[in-house]
Image (tube, helix red, strand yellow):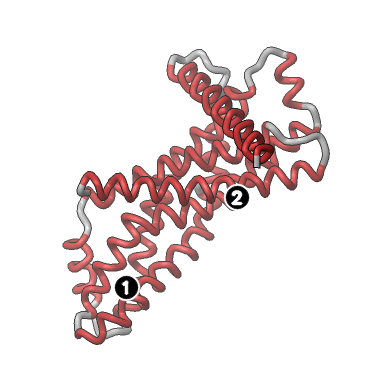
Amino acid sequence: IIKALRILGQSVEVTLGFIGEVALAFSNWLRGNAKTRRQDILFFVEQSGPRALAIVTLIALLVGMILAYLGSVQLRQLGAQVYVADLVAIGMVREMGALMTAVIMAGRTGAAYAAQLGTMQVNEEIDALKTMGISTMEFLVLPRLIALVLVMPVLCIYADAIGIVGGAIVATSMDVNFLQYILQTQGAVDWVDISVGLTKSIFFGILIALAGCQAGIYCGRNSDAVGMAATNAVVRAIVYLVVADAAFNILYDKMGI
């Protein structure tokens, strides 16, 4: 037990140190002193944004349909099928849109970040950057972090819309008029609900980037270590996401949002 606690303490110490270095690099970037290239940020925005639309579309559509089917089982008994629109809209906008998009990006982009940086570590490219006096946080980590933070809210909104469409497909098969479904959705969702999901998505993007980049930067020096880094990135990111989502929900409940 003592050994396990010691390992856990060392892991927490390394993680906090990494977060501190990223925060310093971000402050330098805000002041315009960082060696972060704009073209790198745009490259990672394209990599993590438009190229992820297909899988986000598929998952969000299916999640919206699943929510509608689950709600219809009970609502049909009460003759209140129209309230499927409320269930799907609130569920997607406040919770499932941001969370499912984050899980997809953790498996897709977080693992890619870990593999890219891990391969650079194996090839001693990171050591070469340090030798030249270039900050790896500013040159390698920050562009990936900024790109994911910019992309996640957009993907979240997109997933919300696609999920609502998925719910509409199911609702129209339950004798709910499509126009009635849209009007019910508009009445159920307000800007507070939308801001809840967007806030989550921004923090989720930060957590995914931190998990992926940390796993890659601290990767070992062989090919097996690169695979382990990608695995660790996904596992850590999903754990971070679930814990953060629970914390957000508790906070919103206490605030009455």
* Image location of residue 10, percent across then percent down: 63, 31
Per the image, the residue denoted by label 1 is: 168
**Residue at image point 44% right, 38% down:** 150
| Residue type at numbered disc 1 | Ala
Residue nearest the viewer, comparing 58 with 190 = 190
**Residue in the picture at 50% in, 19% down:** 24
Which quarter of the rendered picture does the N terminus lie within? top right
Report the label total. Answer: 2
What is the number of the mark on residue 256?
A: none
Q: Is residue 187 above or below residue 25?
A: below
2 and 1 marks in contact (CB < 8 Å): no
Q: Secondary structure at mark 2?
A: helix
Res. 187 image quadrant: bottom left
Circle 1 crowding by C-alpha within 10 Å: few under 14, some 14–19, many from 20: many
Residue 40 seen from this side: no
Residue drawn at the location 73% of the way across and 46% of the way down:
228
- Spatial separation of the CA atoms under disc 2 and disc 1: 33 Å
Q: Position of residue 8 (x, y in %)?
A: 61, 37
Question: Of the residues tagged 2 and 1, which is closer to the observer?
Answer: 2
Q: Residue at 45%, 48% (x, y): give it.
A: 243
- Labelled disc at residue 235: 2
x and y, in percent, of residue 70 in the image: 36, 76
Q: Residue 32: x and y, percent?
A: 47, 15
Q: Is residue 84 left or right of residue 156?
A: left
> Identity of the amino acid at label 2?
Val
Q: Nearer the viewer, residue 161 or 249?
A: 249
Q: Is residue 249 visible?
A: yes
Compared across the picture, whether 126 is left or right of 66 comes to: right
